[in-house]
Image: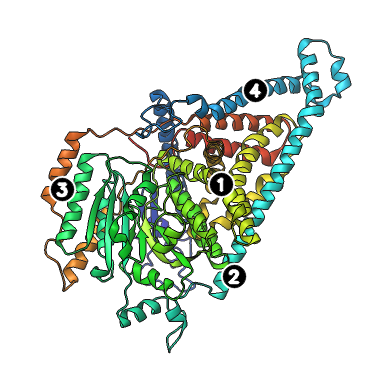
Amino acid sequence: MAPWWGQEARGGVSGGVTGTPVVVKMQTPDWAISEVPPPGSPAAGGKDGRGKNARQITWVLLLKAHRAAGKLTGAATAALSVAAAARRRVAAGRTDSDADADGAPPGPGAGRPALRTRLYGFIRASLLLSLLLLAADVAAHAQGWHLAALPDLEAVEGLFAAGYAAWMRARAAYLGPALQFLTNACVVLFMIQSADRLILCLGCFWIKLRGIRPVPNAAAAGNGKGSDDVEAGAQEEEEEGEFPMVLVQIPMCNEKEVYQQSIGAVCNLDWPRSNFLVQVLDDSDDAATSALIREEVEKWQREGVRILYRHRVIRDGYKAGNLKSAMNCSYVKDYEFVVIFDADFQPQEDFLKLTVPHFKGKEDVGLVQARWSFVNKDENLLTRLQNINLCFHFEVEQQVNGAFLNFFGFNGTAGVWRIKALEDSGGWMERTTVEDMDIAVRAHLKGWKFLYLNDVECQCELPESYEAYRKQQHRWHSGPMQLFRLCFVDIIKSKIGFWKKFNLIFLFFLLRKLILPFYSFTLFCVILPMTMFAPEAELPAWVVCYIPATMSLLNILPAPKSFPFIVPYLLFENTMSVTKFNAMISGLFQLGSAYEWVVTKKSGRSSEGDLVALVENEKQSKQQRVGSAPNLDSLAAKEELYLKSEPKKKKHNRLYRKELALSFLLLTAAARSLLSVQGIHFYFLLFQGVSFLVVGLDLIGEQVE
């Protein structure tokens, strides 16, 4: 017997089948409906077999309501868990000022906490002032004084009325004009930076349209080969038996999570073993970690790989000092090129064959840089947002500068240097925390050209916690300002052309390293809230919404799968402006922790996949080497030694005071904007304030239970 909702609605079943039986599969919160035609009925796809009665529609509506209720329940549960996490963070009271916040050694500014808290003090004072002004404005609106002219208000008796009248006079005479001037200046800077971003995007579009990319000379020569074959140069060299001598360097410091996969990837590079040497440059201050790395090197030495282990007891100059020390070895003179891979980078086997041929016949090329790709870009919201930023940096900024200017900032890893170019530029220097940018600028001033290969990828990791990302961004934005102070005179005195000097000073340093964090913080975190309390100064809606949305859309084009995150990306970039602005000021004026170097923490999430791939390759290879599998017993013993020697520090999510103070300031300004009926400003301030609150409570990125 058919279910009651499949029977004929009129006259029983004798009049034929007018409904379609359904089988309902319901599994909270998902469900599915399958139509089952009864025996003797027309085909399911026929015209008469598609009838639906009212009871079927009712069931469908009920099931959709059930699904919607399930989603609402899930959202409510997520909101409650977030609230619980925030409550635990506040109760724990661990802030970013704690001594063990990152386990890093104290920097030059560690003994001067006042220098590190000036920005926080300014934000806190602004918050207190905004709360007082909000209370005053609410009281004035309650009295209707906002509708009265100033002479009428001065006639009102009372201390509060006199004070509010004085505040209105000061706003109109002093604060409003000064704030409007600062607003206009920031808007001009904002438009210049937006024009630069648009030009970069147009340049990238032209490169894609015309198929512009670096081609080795051997491939460009032709001889029956396609000119677009990137590997043609490497194939030509292989046929002739020409393989230049290559030095591969892996600088690392306490990289316990990723050392094995990076060393394994480099040792498996497809290049004659007699023509390349691997240097593992270990700056670890932990004896157990150093022992693990040394054992890994010895294992590859037994397999016939030319690999050396170097360990510095005194870590002078950080990474720059490590590389400088390695380049002073006497055997370096036997090599023509040097390749640098950070500890979390895993190059493909054909990396050298895709990069080194680009130097052939181009004696003025000093650097070939490959693009980064990320193994953990979908790990959490923080890594997704980082992926958007870095995709634009590599796909657009680096590619355009490499194609049209033959210059870009060296990314510090996944690049091949001509050793002659390094020596001609003065070698590695420890004067800044961005030694990679330093050597790139000095090489450019000496006339060396750079090539960027967008088609050659090298996998690495993104920071998964906000603390690690924050430290990384601080170093990346304070270092360029240190370098700008040091090399400004050298740029002016150099023999390069005027337009190259203009590109270095204005575009490379001022616009993209100084103006961008300055106007982003000043315009959206200072001026916009202040204009809510001083309506005499106006910030147009197109500056608040339309232009930032357009720029965010351009930024996200190289990563189209990240389009659903365009709004969080816009808000998060403004949220990070406080860290970038603080770092920029510290580097420019040598304040606080300008020279602080903290190694970015890695998770080693790709280790398992790399080891599995390595085992599979070894099984399939006919030239399998004995002893290539890791010594698991020895590794376990070393791991036990590591745990006994130094107990593992517990991780904690922390409260970030600057971000929290700015969140309360923006939310207060959002409440004030309601009194002025400024709709779009209210929504921007509200969502931006919530974004600062989420980041300030460390609810983005890796969550520690």
| Total tally of numbered discs in the picture | 4
Q: Is residue 423 above or below residue 232?
A: above
Q: What residue does disc 1 label?
A: 484
Q: CA distance from mark 2 to mark 1?
A: 31 Å
Instruction: Give x and y (percent) for residue 302.
Output: 14, 60
The kind of secondary structure element at disc 1 is helix
For this orientation, the residue located farthest to the top is 158
Q: Quadrant of the N terminus?
A: bottom left
Q: CA distance from mark 1 to mark 4?
A: 36 Å
Q: Position of residue 583 (x, y in %)?
A: 52, 39
- Between marks 3 and 1, how big is the CA–CA gap? 45 Å
| Secondary structure of the residue carrying numbered label 4 | helix
Q: Residue at x 45, y 38 (%)?
A: 595
Residue in front for this viewpoint, 101 or 254: 254
Vertical arrangement, residue 357 with respect to residue 422, above or below? below
Disc 3 to disc 2, how far (Cα)? 52 Å
Dot 1 alpha-carbon crowd within 10 angstroms: few under 14, some 14 to 19, many 20 or more = many
- Residue named by callout 3: 635
Closer to the chain start, of discs 2 and 1, is 2
423 lies left or right of 203: left
Report the side of 389 relative to 506 (left or right): left
Q: Which dot marks residue 206?
A: 2
For the residues labelled 4 and 3, the Cα–Cα distance comes to: 59 Å
**Which label sits on residue 129?**
4
Q: Earlier in the sequence, mark 3 or mark 2?
A: 2
Is any part of residue 455 visible from this angle?
yes
Mark 1 or mark 4, earlier in chain: 4
User: Between tags 3 and 1, which lies in front?
Assistant: 1
Disc on res. 370: none
Picture quarter with the C terminus: top left
Residue type for callout 2: Trp
The reply to whether callout 2 and callout 1 are in contact (CB within 8 Å) is no
